[in-house]
Amino acid sequence: MSEMKKLPELFGSMVFNEETMKERLSSASYGAWKKSVTEGTALDISTANEIAEAMKQWAVEKGATHYTHWFQPMTGVTAEKHDSFIAPAEGGRIIMEFSGKELVRGEPDASSFPSGGLRATFEARGYTAWDPTSSAFIKEGSLCIPTVFCSYSGHALDKKTPLLRSMEEVSRQAIRILRLFGDTETKRVMPQVGPEQEYFLVDKALFNRRKDLRMTGRTLFGAKPPRGQELEDHYYGAIKPRVAAYMKDLDEKLWALGIFSKTKHNEVAPSQHEMAPVYTDANTACDHNQLAMEVMKKVADRHNLVCLLHEKPFAGVNGSGKHDNWSLGTDTGKNLFKPGSTPSQNAQFLLFLAAFLKGVDDYQDFLRATVAFPGNDHRLGAQEAPPAVISVFLGDELNAVVESIIQGTEYKEAGKRTLQIGVDSLPAIRQDNTDRNRTSPMAFTGNKFEFRMPGSSMSISGPNIALNTIMAEELKQFADALEASEDFRSELPELIRQAFTDHRRIIFNGNGYDGAWIAEAEKRGLTNLKSTADALPAYVDPKNIDLFVKHGIYTEEEVRARYEIHVENYTAVLSIEAATMIDMIRHDILPAVSKYAAELCARAESKKRLDVPCAYEVNTARGVAKITDDLMEQCRVLGSDLEDMPAGPEEAMRYCHDTLVPDMAEARESVDALEVLTAGESWPFPVYSELLFSV
């Protein structure tokens, strides 16, 4: 930690947070901002000007010279255009200016961001608008103002806008339910999110010698090293000094930015690690995770390391996920997924649980689509992450409660009293009522659901938009029925029982890695969308489009645009990987192994002249030559297939999956076999044993 500051002083020191606003704004302007955040009222220009001036003064005191609207386009990363605070003054001097108009709105060029057809290339105008619920912060000399991003015609071109819409909608529907249970205090329900972030660290010098890592973020080639994760000694092991120094520096940078970095540890694979934050509201969590990924890379660079966020940088060892822990909390401090200690609390909890189970079952295909992209295809279903089949793990105790409700039987707590299931006598359910199931895509972990399918490099906005909207839909259905009920107390248990009964198939507490589960899931009628190419079409399924349009999260055009963006991204990523593979084979691997084979032949000839045994040289040269010829042909086929890419986006996506992926797998197998045969000094780039054990 910085010698100059203690942790409480360091935390949030680079954030224009609520405490700072309260100190620097008039009570009237602070109150207007607070009302804007809680009630969605508009800020008048005089208030915006005062906030902008206070924000500028604070930023300049912290050393900032520029400001930028910081937004999240459909690239999956953040974007920013920087303007200085300077304005010309008399005598050739400058003054520092920043107005309310500049705070609340910007006009970045929108033509070159992914739009899925919502914008033509020649139509450049786009707008950024300040999100007053997200705190501004200082990063590398610039005041960063979190904003939404939309087109000239008003279409959302970013990930923040629909997230904010979904948060408002799930709050609206959840409050309807709470009112039925007599809660008149809660004014807002907020999705709470905590994304665990896994990553790899590799030496920068070794990284720079791997063209595949530089171009694609993963190794396209690499033979299995003598040692991987078999000893299971890296997980939670003592952190190496170089990594510890990186983590210390990272924590300080994140804390200064107000990011709740809480946990750090070694993960399962060599050189793999994890950072986990404290839970916060979904909007802040998404902002923080985007910022954290950027900071992780920059801090690594200062330590002569590279932070790899790809889901599968190395074959044969665990890949990296981003477990999205999701729940609903009230502005009065209650967690709606925390089993209560009284009958009425339990009835409310079970209703929210029923809504969640129903929603996951009804929209399992869309949830799968939100985590579908090329990097995650290497991870899902690979015995290191959840299978591609969506299911929910409840644990034995909670599952027994659900089963007793379905069957209409008494629930008997282990070693305790027997209770009749009903509104007034539901059992008290302990918060830590279950073990964890790391093979489950959606696991209940006491007071939240852990969505384990998202990949480490992705924005968490998409999955959380889906969870919020799905939950809003099911709560709306329940609220519609219960508000129309003549006898709420008698009809509530039947509604819960019916939901559990109808959606029982989505509950699975067993081993998701077991092949028998996949067969069982098929019998249950659950979807098994094994690849991105299989999953993405769910975006445009009519029922899914209807869900998001009905709740005002997306227009139909915005849904279809996102589908098109994801489809084109899949093809672009696979094309880049294929082209990189061809480049490395032709310019690095074939020349290196050909030279090595020639050296072996020359040595064999020299030995033969002296009547010295040369079986190693002869046999190895023959093996290398045979595989080299095979690889040359495989490279030719890959190149030819890449050139034959269909023009249509959907056809191209399917073609990449069905043709390029098998081509690349075949070429990789040959290259990895050549690596095993080739002397280390002759191999053209660092191998896995160097990359995984160099830090």
Image: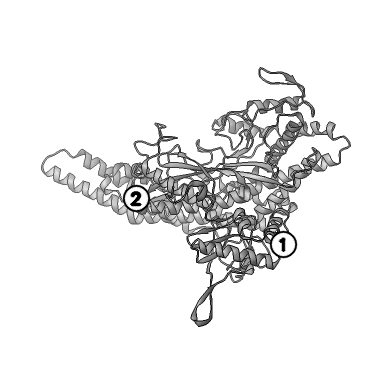
Direction left: furthest residue: 610
Classify residue 58 by image quadrant.
Answer: bottom right
Q: Which residue is drawn at 73% across and 54% down?
A: 39
Residue 343 tag number: none
Q: What element carries label 1?
A: loop
Q: Is residue 372 shown left or right of residue 41? A: left
Label 1 is placed on what type of residue?
Ala
Question: Residue 388's spot in the image, x, y percent?
Answer: 58, 40
- Residue extending furthest toward the right: 486
**Depth order, front residue of 452/544:** 452
Q: Name the residue under label 2.
A: 206
The percent coordinates of residue 539 (x first, y second) are 65, 51
Which residue is tagged 1? 42
- Look at the image and tell me in which quarter the C terminus lies: top left
- Which of the marked residues, 2 or 1, is nearer the chain's N terminus? 1
The answer, for residue 178, to whether it is visible in the render is yes
Determine whether, in the image, residue 408 is placed left or right of residue 454: right
The residue drawn where x is 58% and y is 54% is: 566
